[in-house]
Every structure is written in C-alpha cells, then in structure tokens.
Image (cartoon, rainbow, N blue to C red):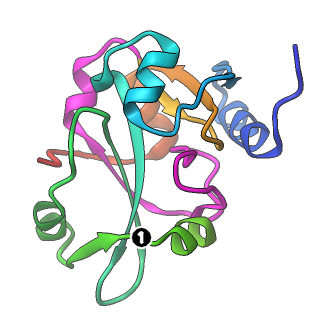
C-alpha cells in the first residue's frame, strides 16, 4: 500500500482517533467535483459528500455544511437556521480555517473546531463518499458515521 499524502494522512489519522476503521484512498482520477468523485468511485452524485465552508457575514465564523453532491446549499435558509447570514468562504478563508484546499475539504481532520450542519438528503443512502484532504482522496462511510465524526446537526439545506 502506498503512503498517503500529508493531507490525506491527516484525515486517516482523524478517522482512527474516532475509533473508525475507514480507509482513505488516493485515486489517479480527480475527485474535486461531486461529478468527478462519483465517476471515480462508481456511485451516484447524490452519494458524494460535499464539505463546503461558509463564513458568517457579521462575525466571520466558519460554518461547515456537508451536503449531498446532488444539492446546492440555500444560503438564505441556512442563515435563517443559524441566525446569521452566511456567504461562501474564499479559498484563503477555507484553507486558513480547515487546513485543506477547496476541492479536498474533508468533514473530519479540520484544523479548527467548526460548527457543522449535515444535509438530511445524505441520510437516504446506505453508503456515502467524502473528500479526504486532497482533490484525489476519498473515503467511504455511512450517514451514521458521518454524524459521529462531525457532530453535525441534520438539516434541510434546500
């Protein structure tokens, strides 16, 4: 087995710290977008976990929304749930808050503790696939494991 890149290893370590035996895989194909990831692992786009970092507009706090690859986050709705408007985090903000680049943000192993919401549509699948620190790394998990590793609150993101 080849050695994982530093970012992918950070995700693998975080999974193991949570007591899970999930395996990070680095692939030759890009998994940067939900469609690319679904094609690379052979699943439906809806089974891809997009880990998106938003920034609260007033306080500048990071918010992680893990959503189905088939969905687009309704920022206004999530802002209402949060009680503060949100906007998409810039590439610099995402890297500063998570330690990952856009396209490889994992739902675990983040640099800082981050408020997290989980798209309820992910719960409809037996298995889902999440990014693992790079645009070429993923890991398979269940929705229950996603809830465990993120501590996120399940909401409708639509």
Q: Which residues are magenta?
A: 98-127
**Residue 94 appears left or right of 43:** right
Would you name the residue on which mark 1 appears?
A: 89
Give the percent coordinates (x, y) of residue 92.
57, 73
Q: Camera-side residue: 67 or 18?
A: 67
**Residue 134 appears left or right of 122:** right
- Callout 1 secondary element: loop
- Image point 67% across, 28% down: which residue? 19
Q: Camera-side residue: 20 or 141?
A: 141
Q: Camera-side residue: 29 or 134?
A: 29
Image quadrant for the N terminus? top right
- Image point 34% across, 11% down: which residue? 126
Residue 84 is drawn in which quadrant?
bottom left
**Residue 73 appears left or right of 43:** left
Give the percent coordinates (x, y) of residue 14.
69, 41
Q: Camera-side residue: 122 or 101?
A: 101
- Say whether residue 108 is magenta: yes
Give the percent coordinates (x, y) of residue 99.
66, 61
- Image point 37% across, 48% down: which residue? 152
- Say whether residue 57 is magenta: no
Q: Main secondary structure of the magenta part?
A: loop
Mark 1 is surrounded, within 10 Å at the Cα level, by few (under 14), some (14 to 19) or many (20 or more) other residues, namely many
**Depicted 88 relative to depicted 24: above or below:** below
């Amino acid at each position: 087995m080849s050695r994982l890149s530093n970012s992918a290893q950070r995700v693998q370590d975080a999974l193991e710290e949570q007591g899970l035996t999930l395996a990070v895989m680095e692939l030759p194909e890009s998994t940067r977008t939900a469609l690319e990831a679904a094609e690379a692992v052979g699943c439906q786009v809806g089974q891809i976990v997009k880990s998106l970092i938003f920034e609260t507009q007033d306080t500048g706090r990071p918010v992680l929304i893990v959503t189905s690859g088939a969905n687009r986050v309704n920022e206004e709705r999530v802002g209402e749930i949060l009680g503060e408007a949100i906007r998409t985090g810039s590439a610099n903000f995402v890297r500063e808050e998570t330690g990952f680049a856009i396209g490889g943000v994992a739902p675990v192993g983040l640099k800082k503790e981050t408020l997290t919401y989980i798209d309820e549509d992910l719960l409809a699948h037996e298995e889902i696939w999440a990014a693992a620190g790079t645009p070429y790394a993923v890991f398979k998990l269940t929705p229950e494991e996603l809830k465990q590793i993120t501590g996120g609150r399940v909401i409708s993101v639509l």
